[in-house]
Image: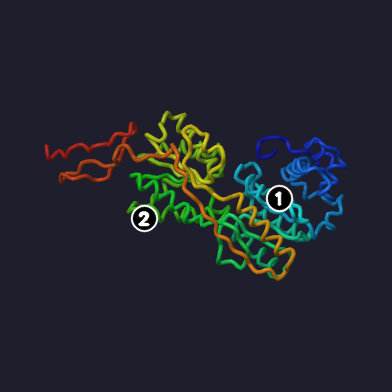
Amino acid sequence: MSEFGQEKPDKVDMTFIALKAGVSRSTVARVISDPGKVKESTRSRVQAVMAEHKYLYNLHAADFTKRKTSMFALIIPTVRSSIHAEFIEGIHDGLKSSPYDLAIGYTGYDLDEEAEYIKIFSERKMAGIIILGIKEQTKDLIYSIVARKEMGVVSTWEYTPQYPISCVGFDNFEAARKMTRYLTSLGHRRIGLITGPTSASTRVMRRLEGYRTALEDAGIPFDDRYVTHTFPSLVDGRGAATRMMELDPRPTAIFAASDALAIGVLKALRDLRICVPDDVSVCGFDNIDIASYCAPTLSTVAVPAYEMGLKAAHSLICQADNPDCEVQKYCLDTELIIRDSSAPLTVPDFRPSRDGGFEYGRVDTDGRPTVPDPDPEEE
C-alpha cells in the first residue's frame, strides 16, 4: 500500500509513466534522453510523475549515463508542499539559460531513501545535486563525494558555515527565536511548539533551540509538554493542536514550524470552538500563498524559497563548469509577517498573591484567571 492507502502498481515502467502523465511512451523516452526537445509544460508533468513514482530506479531502458554532464538532481522530502514548489521554481529559472536539466528524487522524509538517492545519483554521474540540509546520517557520504569531486553539491534551507560545502540557506535558529520572542512580547508565557521530527533534519533542531532560547530570554521555563514533533502536514497539525488543547493549563499561543501545520492548527481550534486570536494566537513558518487567505490570516515567518532555489542553481552551475570553483555560502534573510492570527494576551495570566501583589497562575477553559481558594487558616 502507498502512504495514502492506495494500491501500488505492480510495475512502474515507461508505459505506466506515459499513462499517468497522459502522453505517449516516445514522449517519456524523449524526456529521459533529450528533455530540451520536449515542451516545458509536458516535460514538467512527466518529470513530476517520474519523481512521484521514483522512476529513477527504472531508467535502465534509456542510456541515462550519456546525460551525465548535463543533468542536476534535487533530493527533496516531498513534492506536495507549495513552499517546495516555489523552491523548485527558483531552481528551474536558475537553469533556464544553462545546458543543464533537473531530475528530482522524492524521499518522503526517509533518511535511508535519501542516502540511496545520493548513491544512485553519484553512480549515474550527475553533474551535481541539491540537498535540503546536511544530516548526520548522510554527512560522511556527502563529504566523500565532495572530496573526490565526483559531482557538485549544494546544501539548502539552512546556513551551515561549519561544513566545507556550498550552501544557500537561512538562520533557522534566529528565525524561530524571532517568532517566539514576538509571542512573548505579546504577553504569552505558555507557547506551544509544533515542529517536525528532529531526526529528519538539523534545521528542525535549530528551530527548537531558537524557541527555547527565546523562552529563556523572557524568563519562561522550558516545558517539554508544550512541544510536539510530527510530520509537517495539515492532518498532523490538526491532531497535534487537538492534543495540545487537552493540556492543563493549555497554551495561549501555538507556534507551528510550517504553515501547513499552522493551518491544521487553525482547523483544530475552529472545531473546538476556540477563537483565534482572542483565546489562542497561532503563528506559522514559510509564508506560503494561502497564509494570507486563511481565516484569520496567518502570522508567519517568510522564507526566501524562490531565491534559495535560484542561488542554488547558480552555485551548482559554477561547480559543474569549474571543478576549482570556490565554496559559496549564502545566508538569506527571513522576515516576520504579522497578520490577524496573533494578538496580545487579552487576559493576563496571573492571579492575586497572598502578599497583595500578583503571581503568574493558570487561565481556566473560558480564558478567565483562576483565583485560588483562600487558605482556611486565613478565613
Residue 163 place in picture, x, y as percent: 59, 66
Q: Which of the labelled discs sits on residue 105, or is there none?
A: 1
Is residue 119 visible from the viewing direction of this image? yes
- In three-dimensional space, the C-alpha distance between marks 2 and 1, rounded to whole angstroms, equals 40 Å
Q: What element carries label 1?
A: strand
* Residue 82 found in image quarter: top right
Q: Callout 1: 10 Å neighbours few (<14), some, many (20+)?
A: many
Vertical arrangement, residue 80 with respect to residue 72, above or below: above
Q: Where is residue 200 in the image (x, y as percent from the top left)?
A: 58, 52
Q: Residue 216 carries which label?
A: 2
Residue name at image x 37 percent, y 44 percent: 190
- Please state, as top left, top right, bottom left or bottom right, where the N terminus lies in the image: top right
Q: Along the horizontal axis of the image, is 205 left or right of 108?
A: left
| 162 lies left or right of 336 | right
**What amino acid type should be assigned to the residue bearing mark 1?**
Gly
Q: Where is residue 30 in the image (x, y as percent from the top left)?
A: 85, 46
